[in-house]
Amino acid sequence: MTDRPSPAVPIYRRRPREFYALWILATTTYGVGDVVTTVALVWFVPSLAEGNPLVAFAIGRVGLAGLVAVKLAGFGVLLWISVVGGRDDDALVYYFGPVLLTLFGLVVTASNLRLLVAA
């Protein structure tokens, strides 16, 4: 954190279209792409198991709701970090969440699709 005062208007209020576009892209790639392909792998390909221990634990305990809960928790934390960055006028922190989730979602979705095709 810096000693400079917070701006009067946060970044996400000055550029709301950009904020929503970034988070819609992150939701599409991570929230939809990763979750849908993970569900397809875990439920329809018995020879494959979830590689993330936290997600595997959540699925084992609660099923699909556990998977969604873990994904929503990660999404929520990064959204919160982005909002804090926007409030503090810190562009790096502001863009970190949606860019990270978008890239992660693309990579994991592509990997899951590759596993589905190979199965």
Image (spheres, helix red, strand yellow):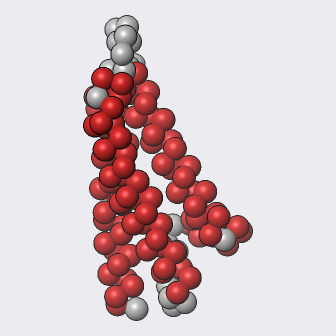
Residue occupying image coordinates x 35% and y 78%: 113
The percent position of residue 93, horizontal first and vertical second, equals: 34, 32
The percent position of residue 90, horizontal first and vertical second, equals: 31, 24
Residue occupying image coordinates x 37% and y 10%: 8
Depicted 105 relative to depicted 80: above or below:
below
- Nearer the observer, 50 or 101: 101
Depicted 16 relative to depicted 96: above or below:
above
Q: Residue furthest front?
A: 17
Residue occupying image coordinates x 31% and y 65%: 107
Question: To which quarter of the image does residue 57 belong?
Answer: bottom right
Marker count (numbered): 0
Question: To which quarter of the image does residue 13 belong?
Answer: top left
Check the picture and name the quadrant holding the C terminus: bottom left
- Please say whether residue 46 is visible from this viewpoint: yes
- Nearer the observer, 82 or 55: 82
The percent position of residue 100, horizontal first and vertical second, equals: 33, 49
Residue occupying image coordinates x 71% and y 68%: 61
Check the picture and name the quadrant holding the N terminus: top left
The percent position of residue 62, horizontal first and vertical second, equals: 70, 67
Depicted 42 relative to depicted 14: above or below:
below
In the image, taking residue 55 as reference, residue 91 lies left or right, namely left
- Please say whether residue 90 is visible from this viewpoint: no
In the image, taking residue 75 as reference, residue 2 lies left or right, namely left
- Nearer the observer, 95 or 11: 11
